[in-house]
Amino acid sequence: MLVSLNLFLTTAKRLTEVSRHHTLTVSKKIVESSQAEIPILLDQYRTSLNGLEDPEVALLQEEYGPNEVTKGKRQSFLERLFDNVKNPLVILLVVLGVISYLTGDIRATVMIGVMVLLGMILRFFQELRADHAAEKLQAMVSTTATVVRSGKKLEVPLKELVPGDIILLSAGDMVPADVRLLSA
């Protein structure tokens, strides 16, 4: 079983390796925390291996808000339509349709126009259905994490995690937040 502090996941060495190959901005606080001794780190986050106390958890939840990934706004009808129009295949067919029209081949122009229109309509509705299905699946999933609070193991929803929580991870568990591994 892994014991981790809700902070971040990776080490400073790994962050340095990644930043050499990609443009990556890493918070100075994260790098410092990855190198800090565990007692100093626990003190910095006002916690202990017995976890946070309930009053402290309430204050931190109020200060930091829920531990949720921000969701992008839904695409409007026009945005979704524009995404369909800027598809390279659609652009190619439109160019071919214009060339057909300029060469006087009206029959080919109409056929290409119908293909473009049908393709865009089908893609639009398939994406709409996929978005709705994904929303329904996400609503059905309830994820929790095992934390130590006031010296007791508790199962809490991921959105209720706060910085300083001591999280217990087992094989197959999802890492619920940015964490620092304390022991394994």
Image (cartoon, grey):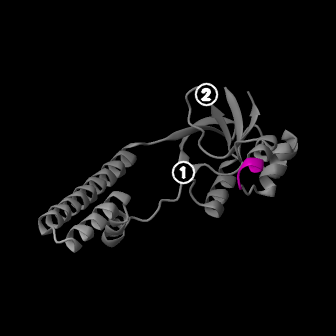
Q: Quadrant of residue 90?
A: bottom left
Give the quadrant of residue 88. bottom left
Does residue 143 sit above or below 23 in this rendering? above
Q: Is residue 179 above or below residue 121?
A: above
Does dot 2 land on a helix, a strand or a loop? loop
The amino acid on which the numbered mark 1 sits, given as a three-letter code, is Lys
Residue 99 vertical position relative to residue 172 in the rendered view, above or below: below
Which quadrant of the rendered structure holds the C terminus?
A: top right
Q: Which residues are magenta?
A: 19-23
Residue 134's x, y, as percent? 36, 49
Q: Residue at x 15, y 67 (%)?
A: 105
Task: Give the vertical position of 66 relative to 106 (above or below).
Answer: above
- Name the kind of residue labelled 2 in the image: Ser
Which tag, 2 or 1, sits closer to the chain's start? 1
Q: Residue at x 36, y 60 (%)?
A: 87
Residue 80 in the image: state x and y as whole percent.
34, 65
Q: Which residue is mark 1?
A: 159
Q: Which residue shows up at 73% across the image and 42% down it?
A: 10
Provide residue 120's location: percent of width, then percent of height.
25, 61
Q: Main secondary structure of the magenta part?
A: helix
Q: Is residue 21 magenta?
A: yes
